Image: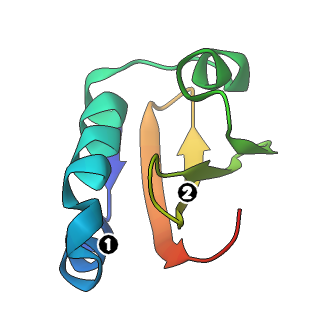
Amino acid sequence: MKVVAVNRILEAQERYPNAHQHLQGWYQIMRESKFRSPEELRKTFGDIRGFNSSFKFPIPETTLLARTFINFEAQVVLIDDVVAGKH
């Protein structure tokens, strides 16, 4: 998939240096995969929340949540934000 607004991952890596590798791993999975539906996302990530085009991904071993919009047909992921908080 094409990942748009990668700068949000880079900003989160600066703000949360302990999560650097986990954020990088999530980004690589998204970039290298061709998810065609929410069901395919759940097979890989399991703990995602969302429907239609809005999805939230808990970043493993962190308290971070990546908020995204996904167009499965166009194979595009827009990273809206990466925020800390309870999942």
Amino acid type of disc 2? Thr
Q: In percent of the image, x 35 and y 20: which residue is there?
A: 33
Q: Quadrant of the C terminus?
A: bottom right
- Classify mark 2: residues with Cα within 10 Å, few (<14), some (14-19) or many (20+): many
Amino acid type of disc 1? Arg
* Left or right: residue 41 compared with residue 60: right
Residue 8 marker: 1
Q: Position of residue 4 (x, y in %)?
A: 33, 56
Q: Is residue 6 visible?
A: no
Q: CA distance from mark 1 to mark 2?
A: 11 Å
* Left or right: residue 80 compared with residue 27: right
Name the one closer to the observer, 40 or 12. 12
Q: Is 73 drawn above or below residue 67 in the view shown?
A: above
In this figure, which colouring scheme has been used for the structure?
rainbow
- Classify mark 1: residues with Cα within 10 Å, few (<14), some (14-19) or many (20+): some
Q: In percent of the image, x 79 and y 42: which residue is there?
A: 52
Mark 2: secondary structure: strand
Residue 68 marker: 2
